[in-house]
Image (cartoon, grey):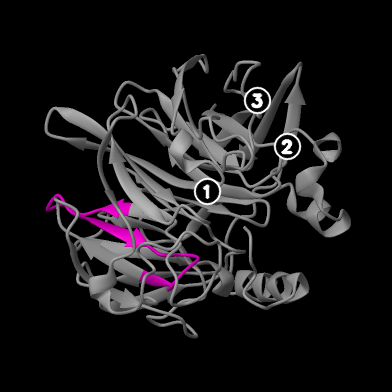
């Protein structure tokens, strides 16, 4: 979550509620039931069994603000967390099999700044794309075991960054600074990058990670952003479109693949990232919910039982003893598994990765 762009938390709450009112008739799926030792959230077609402690992290490792999740073709889950700023040899990326058992760890170089992670199939191989923010200020492509294929710093050829930003390693946030957050993949082998905490621009790269172009920047919406945090290529309609989470405006914005603004989808509360599977789009929202939308971008499920507690408790993210099973605190990223289950990483101090198994 981090900064809130100069607005108060109350401003965000009010704006989110006002936006939600625009979704007339949208189902608010808030039920949580307990059967024996199971907690199930949702209703109708969208009911999920909740396991808030699914990954089995070895005792010699600890979470520090979980940020991103992604699944490979074998069903293994990759989790990136911020990493301990004072533990330079502590990995930021952990890998678990489809039963939640630990496999391996790597990514020590991103300590203190691990943020975005995505998996991509390229020919017969799969690769990890990592975005490091804070003092890291880099993006990278890795093998599944963590070997670096390439790394890139701020794209100075874009003309939007302070001189020397590609070599700078301070944590300062500004619109002429580079603080990348998440990736989306293009069909031509290239990718888009959200500079979500820096310039608020979306950068386009080719398949060899050469910078091509950018769009966006700070503004009031309709093609500009206030924290362009997450993004994904949506190919559910007749024409593929890029969807970007305009987080502090509580909206999603849609664009052509060339970066031309198409429209805005309102009614969220700090949407953080996106994933798409078949006809569903998945949107984790930092204010305590996970949302599913159909191919017409109508809300079909909101798993949001945690929101009332966010209003009642201060600094809930640092007090796990106050958390309740079946309630989210701050969903920061979420992804589908191949069979339609959902993994959720939350922006909480001790880290939390939840598996939602579809019932």
User: What residue is rendered at 34% in x and 79% in y?
Assistant: 160
Is 357 displayed left or right of 28 in the figure? left
Choose between 242 and 133: the one closer to the eye.
Answer: 133
Is disc 2 surrounded by few (<14), some (14 to 19) or many (20+) residues within 10 Å?
many
Q: Which mark is residue 32?
A: 2
The residue under label 3 is 53
- On whether residue 191 falls in the magenta region, the answer is yes
The residue under label 1 is 113
x, y (%) of residue 169?
47, 59
x, y (%) of residue 60?
63, 17
Is disc 3 surrounded by few (<14), some (14 to 19) or many (20+) residues within 10 Å?
few
Whether 65 is drawn above or below 357: the answer is: below
Observer-side mark, 2 or 3, equals 3
Q: Secondary structure at mark 1?
A: loop
Residue 297 visible here: yes
Choose between 320 and 297: the one closer to the eye.
Answer: 320
Q: CA distance from mark 2 to mark 3?
A: 17 Å
Quarter of the image for residue 213 reads bottom left
Point out the stretch of residues depicted in magenta. Answer: 184-201
Residue 23 visible here: no
């Amino acid at each position: 979550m981090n900064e809130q762009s100069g607005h108060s938390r109350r401003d965000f709450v009010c704006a989110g509620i006002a936006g939600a009112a625009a979704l007339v008739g949208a189902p608010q799926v808030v039920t949580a039931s307990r059967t024996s030792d199971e907690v199930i959230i949702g209703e109708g077609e969208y009911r999920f069994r909740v396991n808030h402690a699914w990954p089995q992290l070895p005792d010699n490792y600890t979470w520090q603000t979980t940020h991103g999740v992604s699944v490979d073709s074998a069903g293994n889950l990759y989790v990136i967390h911020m990493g301990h700023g004072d533990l330079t040899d502590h990995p930021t990326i952990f890998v678990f099999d489809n039963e939640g058992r630990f496999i391996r760890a790597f990514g020590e170089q991103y300590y203190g700044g691990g943020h975005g992670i995505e998996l991509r199939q390229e020919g017969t191989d799969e690769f990890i794309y990592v975005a490091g923010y804070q003092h890291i200020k880099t993006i990278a492509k890795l093998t599944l075991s963590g070997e670096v294929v390439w790394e890139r710093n701020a794209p100075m050829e874009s003309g939007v960054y302070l001189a020397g930003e590609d070599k700078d390693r301070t944590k300062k946030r500004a619109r002429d600074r580079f603080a990348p957050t998440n990736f989306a993949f293009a069909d031509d082998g290239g990718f888009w990058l959200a500079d979500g905490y820096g310039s608020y621009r979306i950068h386009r790269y080719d398949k060899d990670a050469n910078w091509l172009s950018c769009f966006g920047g700070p503004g009031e919406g309709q093609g500009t952003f206030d924290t362009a945090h997450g993004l994904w290529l949506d190919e559910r309609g007749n024409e593929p479109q890029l969807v970007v989470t305009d987080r502090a405006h509580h909206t999603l914005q849609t664009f052509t693949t060339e970066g031309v603004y198409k429209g805005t989808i309102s009614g969220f509360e700090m949407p953080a990232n996106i994933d798409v599977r078949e006809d569903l789009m998945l949107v984790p929202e930092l204010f305590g919910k996970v949302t599913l939308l159909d191919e017409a971008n109508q809300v079909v499920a909101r798993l949001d039982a945690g929101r009332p507690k966010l209003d009642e408790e201060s600094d809930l993210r640092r007090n796990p003893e106050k958390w309740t099973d079946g309630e989210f605190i701050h969903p920061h990223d979420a992804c589908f598994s191949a069979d339609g289950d959902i993994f959720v990483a939350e922006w909480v101090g001790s880290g939390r990765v939840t598996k939602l198994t579809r019932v």
